[in-house]
Image (tube, grey):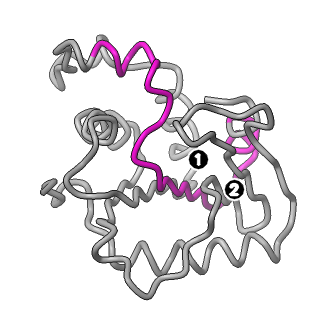
Amino acid sequence: MATAVREALAKAQHSAMHLEMRDSYMRDDPEFVRWQEGHRHDPADRESWWRSWLDVVEETTGRGVSMRRLRVVSEPLSDYVRYEYDGTFTNVAAGEDVRWLPRARSHGLLLPVLEGWVIDAETVILHHFSGDGQWTGERMEVRHDPALAAQYATAYEAAWERAVPHAEYRPA
C-alpha cells in the first residue's frame, strides 16, 4: 500500500473509510496471478497470508480507529473482484469492517468519480487509475480538505447503509 495511506493511517484518530469501485486493479499483481493459477489462502494458516498491510490495519484498529472498506461491485464479479472477495477474510481478521454493494443496489446514490480514502473527516486520499486498473503517474492525491472529506463521507455513508457485510455477502 502506498506510503501516503500508511502515513495517514498512522496519524488517524477516529475513522478511516476506503471506497473501491473498480472491477479490476493491477491485473499483473503477483498475488492475483497466483490466485488465477489456483492458489488460495488457508484461513487456519495465518502465517502464510499475514502481510505488512495487515500489520497497519491491526495497529490502526488497535488504537480504536474505525476502519471500513466499501466495495461497489458489478455482478457477476470480475475475476479480480472475486480474488479480492476470496482474500477479504484477511482484512476482517486484522480488524477492518468490509461491506459489498452490488451496483444494482446503488440506484439513486451519488458516488464520487475517484475512489480513495477519507481519514478523520478531514483528509481525502484520491486514487488515480488508468482504464485498465493500473496506477497512473499521479497515483494518489492527498487533499487536506474538510469540505471535500464531508462530501465523500456523505456519499460513503449512504452507500454503506445499503451494502452487505462481508460475512453475509454471497456473490451472484
State yes or no: residue 13 in magenta: yes
Q: Quadrant of residue 84?
A: top left
Mark 2 is surrounded, within 10 Å at the Cα level, by few (under 14), some (14 to 19) or many (20 or more) other residues, namely: some
- Per the image, label 1 sits on a secondary structure element best described as loop
Residue 30: x %, y % from top left: 42, 13
State yes or no: residue 8 in magenta: yes
> Is the C-beta separation of discs 1 and 2 under 8 Å?
yes
The residue tagged 2 is 13
Q: Residue at point 72% right, 68% down?
A: 121
State the quadrant of the N terminus.
Answer: top right
Q: Residue at point 29% right, 12% down?
A: 34
Which mark, by number, is residue 63?
1
Residue type at mark 2? Gln
Q: Is 22 positioned to the left or the right of 7 in the image?
A: left
- CA–CA distance between discs 1 and 2? 8 Å
Count of marks overlaid on the render: 2
Q: Quadrant of residue 70?
A: bottom left
State which region is magenta: 6-34
Camera-side residue: 115 or 129? 129
Q: Residue at point 61% right, 60% down?
A: 15
